[in-house]
Amino acid sequence: VVLGGIRGRVCGIARLGKYLLIDFSTGRVLLAHLGMSGRIVIVPRSTAREPHTHAVLRLDSGDDLRYVDPRRFGALAVYPRGAVRASDELRALGPDPLGGGFTPAYLAGALAATRGVAVKSFLLDQRRIAGLGNIYASEVLWVARIAPRRRANQVRGDEVARLHRAVVDVLSAAVARRGTTLRDYVDAGGEGGENQEFLAVYDRAGEPCGECGARVRRIVQGARSTFYCPRCQRR
DNA sequence: TAACACCTGTTC
DNA sequence: GAACAGGTGTTA
């Protein structure tokens, strides 16, 4: 597969929200989003090609960088370096909690600016905060002790401070544990992460809350599963 | 703001 | 066969 004439030396790799940015010495940037089932793997060129391999970059090392995505919800794009930030993909993203700009004051303002949306859905909105997905949204709210159906613009004061800290802590911990592997996720070396062993509520409906022992509940919000503790997260 | 669409694979 | 899955964009 030809990727917009990508060539040259990889001179940097960065992440913004759920987007991976691979910087090439020739002035181009490969933007990748893994969607639900995407993987980027680096394997010897002789390795048999997996089904659903949509793109391959030949590396001088003799390895291939392969983009594999059975469900095809992910995407690849190439931009000149100077045009990446203004691209359709990145233009509207909110601050990344592990980058700059995600402050308690920002969060308070973003929450207050909403109209009636549930705080769980707020956390999933990449225009407000870039990088939280369905797993971490539930985990964040459990850590912050906020009920998922709470209206975002009703979250105030000390709750905002707890929410801000929870967002940063949950994401930092997940990255430190190299991701959450429930089904598909692996890193470029094919290794799964460890964070799934530390999930408090996600995918744990019916199990006791580690804090209070109440049964974790599953509800559906915006067609996505939400998990929470009905005792620890009363409001 | 909710529903649905886009896809394939896994599990019940 | 149905329900479900880590995401997001469009439509009503």
Image (tube, coloured by chain):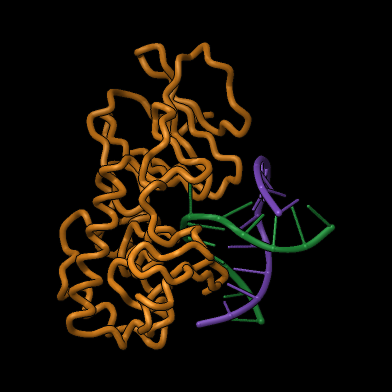
Chain colours: A orange, B purple, C green
Relative image position of residue A46 (x, y in whole percent): 52, 11
Residue at x-position 51% and y-position 49%: A36
Q: Is residue A79 visible?
A: no
* Relative side of A160 to A152, left or right: left
Residue at x-position 38% and y-position 43%: A31
How many discs mark residues in the rendered view? 0
Residue toward you, A220 or A231: A231
Residue at x-position 46% and y-position 33%: A3
Residue A131 vertical placement versus A218 (above, below): above
Residue A111 vertical placement versus A93 (above, below): below
The image quadrant that residue A95 belongs to is bottom left
Relative image position of residue A202 (x, y in whole percent): 45, 59
Residue A146 vertical placement versus C2 (above, below): below
The image quadrant that residue A98 belongs to is bottom left
* Relative side of A78 to A28, left or right: right
Residue at x-position 39% and y-position 26%: A189
Residue A80 vertical placement versus A151 (above, below): above
In the rendered view of the protein, which quadrant contains the N terminus of chain A? top right
Residue toward you, A129 or A198: A198
Relative image position of residue A15 (x, y in whole percent): 29, 46
Relative image position of residue A47 (x, y in whole percent): 53, 15
